[in-house]
Amino acid sequence: MITITDLPIHSGDLLRAFEAENAAAGAIVTFTGQVRPNSNSGAVSALFLQAYSPMTETGIERAIKTANAKWPLTGVKVVHRVGEMQPGDTIVFVAAASKHRRAAFEAADFLMDYLKTEAVFWKKETVADKATWIEPRAEDYQDARRWNMEQAQACQE
Amino acid sequence: MITITDLPIHSGDLLRAFEAENAAAGAIVTFTGQVRPNSNSGAVSALFLQAYSPMTETGIERAIKTANAKWPLTGVKVVHRVGEMQPGDTIVFVAAASKHRRAAFEAADFLMDYLKTEAVFWKKETVADKATWIEPRAEDYQDARRWNMEQAQACQE
Amino acid sequence: MAKLLYFGRLSDLTGTTVEVLDLPDDIRTAADLRDWLDLRFEASGAMKEPTVRIAINNEIVFDADPVAGDDEIAFMPPVGGG
Amino acid sequence: MAKLLYFGRLSDLTGTTVEVLDLPDDIRTAADLRDWLDLRFEASGAMKEPTVRIAINNEIVFDADPVAGDDEIAFMPPVGGG
């Protein structure tokens, strides 16, 4: 259900496997996040992702539990990369399956908001040989608030 | 950009190709719709999908044009199956790529609402040897109204 | 010759998805065609339902719009894929 | 021996991601530890920022919570993946 890995993520293979596991679902939504070649400060040469196990995994598990409580899901998958990455590499793959397409869309969207603002990762971006630690943007926190994350956080405590 | 086909749809392969074409996007959302093994009236043995070319294709093209006007997308893909299908088979695959994850989610969601309620297809479901033509549910029309489809339709005229 | 297409549940009613025929001379509009076909197929109004749209040569038309003897005319019950 | 972990930008400040050491006897709470480390690394308050959360043995704690000499203590600036 949750994989934290320093190996390349192949979303196509993950989707094929997820579909086979959820063939009776009806609706499957996936999100793939890739390292972008450009940031506000210029051309990105590398991105470094750091996790803190087992806090990272237990946090994601709780978010999946919250998603399962909010929506009627038949399956959820979260794969997140750590370590050194290059532009175009996949950072994260999220999949949600449900009988209802709205539930699948909302659950994938919710999990991404969690991953962006609450999941225990730190990101360092290298632009022109200068490495900078990147923290969530105001926009990310705003997206996350749509789900009443306070409530989600309360569930985690 | 648009494929109407009577051959099986392999979402995993389509996602891999779409990612390669949109490696610089940052955010990719996909939707896969599968034939469900059960409907309100019982166990489904087959689903038959009928299109009317070129109206089906031109309608989807207009919906993609509307999506491109509403959101900053770097790529869109719609693959829709026609003909005879069995439970578990993929009916539709939609992918949207954007620099912004919200745009990718909303565009995929919007295109699915279009496909469910406006796209030129007719569906016949077979349950216990009885075939019934299925028309969109009230819920589908309701979902579609979220996007102010009247406006989208106006753009199409 | 006009080409008539019947989609979705209408093909069950007409027993065919397509037919090619000469339209009677007094059929001038889409509405005339609905009336004529509804009688011809004993459709009890099914061809005249407002939710059944008519496309002529791949464009949705209004009931008052004209039909010509060589048109491709499609009868389209509510659509929806996915 | 306590194990101290410095994540994200804090590792640039401390020059390491992990260190194992004996805590001074007068460090009783998470707040005491923040103060001590802030001085030790000349961090100008960076270890004391409220957005930097502290986890002891994988649980987020409050500043008034106690620290023990054999804890694993993580200093966590704002998190976010994806």
Image (cartoon, coloured by chain):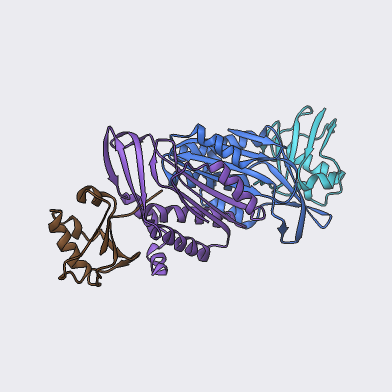
Chain colours: A purple, B blue, C cyan, D brown
Between A33 and C61, which is closer to the camera in this rendering? A33
Does residue B53 lie above or below A65 as drawn?
above
Is residue C71 in view from this perspective? yes
Residue A99 is left or right of residue D26, and the answer is: right
Query: Where's residue A63, x and y in %?
Result: 45, 61
Residue at (58% x, 46% y) in the render: A15
| Nearer-the-camera pick, C73 or A53 | A53
Give the vertical position of B53 relative to B94 (above or below): above
For the C terminus of chain B, the image quarter is top right
Q: Residue at x 72, y 56 (%)?
A: B37
The residue depicted at 72 percent of the width and 61 percent of the height is: B40
Nearer to me, C67 or B132 = B132
Place of residue C25 in the rendered image (x, y in percent of width and height, measured from the top left): 83, 31
Front-most of residues A12 and A146: A12
Percent from the top left, x then y, of residue A7? Answer: 46, 43
Place residue A57 in its image quadrant: bottom left
Instruction: Tell me the quadrant of the picture where the N terminus of chain B can be found.
Output: top right
Question: How many numbered marks have been drawn onto this rendered protein structure?
Answer: 0
Q: Does any portion of residue B106 appear in the rendered image?
A: no
Image position, residue B122 (x, y; %): 72, 45
Position of A110 compared to D72: left or right? right
In the picture, measured across the screen, residue B19 lies left or right of residue B83, that is: left
At 73% from the left and 49% from the top, the residue drawn is: C49
